[in-house]
């Protein structure tokens, strides 16, 4: 019987761990969690698994591992046969470490900020507060968010202009980690018009059998927008 469980929140970063588990071809179970329909937050049951109550989180025997990058590192070091991890000491391995951290450390905070700005803009509020709220959102977008998002999208586009995958010409688990970052960007940006390499990356991963198996097992997958 499988002892490895993925605690999977619908429409979330957990989808990429599901994909990784399929790539690794190991036995695992999925425990499904549904977002609150109003707040879109995770249900309280996830707090019983990990004190932060976020997804993804996995339990493997007595171990609990949270944080996508840490989960990827744990799963790859325990269950991969060298296919998804570049050899130690190579430039590809350094790129692997870099992109694994970059996805959540640099890019996703921009996507979250974008989501929060969108929520503020569309939240019901008294008419006289609306212009103030919109003014703040415009300042954040104009003074920080827009330029930094473009800088990062240009940067990723250039990286995928140099090699097929983020760490070179071999597919690695860092591409799996980066997939959610690009899927989050996709709902806010017209990637195919402005970032053809990024759009092509998404097309390529979506054709991969393990990606498709992950989608099938995880149920409907649609990310929240907000530009
Ligand atoms: N950096 C963390 C982020 C975890 C996270 O925020 N997960 C989201 C899902 S995409 C979540 O659980 N959201 C529900 C909530 O905040 O209540 C990771 O990559 O694991």
Image (tube, rainbow, N blue to C red):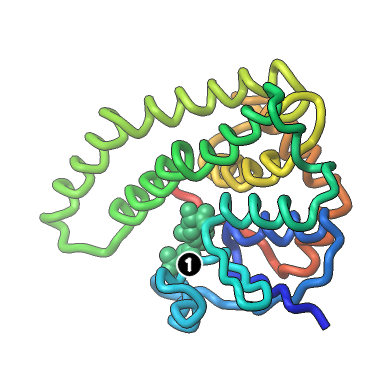
The spot of residue 68 in percent (x, y) is 57, 54
The spot of residue 73 in percent (x, y) is 64, 50
Residue under circle 1? 54
Residue 61, placed above or below residue 113:
below
Judging depth in this view, the residue of 5 and 125 nearest the camera is 5
The spot of residue 120 in percent (x, y) is 29, 54
Assign the C terminus to one quadrant of the image: top left
- Seen at 62% across and 41% down, the residue is 178
- Seen at 19% across and 49% down, the residue is 133
The secondary element bearing badge 1 is classed as loop
- Seen at 80% across and 25% down, the residue is 169
Neighbor class of circle 1 (other Cα within 10 Å; few <14, some 14-19, many 20+) is many
Residue 190, placed above or below residue 9:
above
For the question of whether residue 179 can be seen, the reply is yes
Does ligand 1 reach within 8 Å of label 1's beta carbon? Answer: yes
The spot of residue 108 in percent (x, y) is 47, 44
Residue 20: image quadrant is: bottom right
Residue 68, placed above or below residue 63:
above
Instruction: Judge from the rendering whether residue 81 lies leftward or rightward of residue 144; answer left or right.
Output: right
Instruction: Judge from the rendering whether residue 31 lies leftward or rightward of residue 200; answer left or right.
Output: left
Residue 173, placed above or below residue 14:
above
């Amino acid at each position: 019987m499988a002892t490895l469980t993925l605690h999977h929140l619908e429409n979330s970063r957990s989808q990429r761990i599901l994909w990784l588990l399929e790539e690794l071809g190991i036995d695992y179970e999925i425990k499904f969690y549904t977002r609150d329909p109003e707040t879109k937050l995770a249900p309280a049951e996830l707090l019983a698994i990990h004190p932060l109550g976020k997804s993804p989180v996995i339990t493997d025997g007595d171990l609990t591992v949270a944080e996508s990058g840490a989960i990827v590192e744990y799963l790859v070091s325990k269950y991969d046969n060298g296919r998804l991890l570049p050899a130690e000491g190579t430039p590809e391995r350094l790129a692997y470490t870099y992109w694994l951290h970059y996805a959540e450390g640099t890019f996703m905070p921009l996507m979250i900020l974008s989501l929060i700005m969108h929520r503020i803009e569309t939240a019901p509020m008294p008419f006289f507060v609306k212009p103030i709220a919109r003014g703040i959102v415009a300042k954040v977008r104009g003074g920080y968010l827009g330029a930094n998002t473009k800088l990062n999208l240009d940067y990723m586009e250039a990286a995928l202009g140099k090699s097929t995958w983020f760490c070179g010409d071999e597919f690695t688990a860092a591409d799996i980690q980066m997939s959610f970052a690009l899927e989050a960007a996709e709902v806010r940006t017209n990637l195919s018009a402005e970032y053809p390499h990024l759009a092509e990356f998404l097309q390529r991963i979506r054709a991969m059998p393990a990606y498709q198996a992950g989608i099938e097992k995880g149920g409907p997958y649609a990310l929240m927008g907000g530009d």
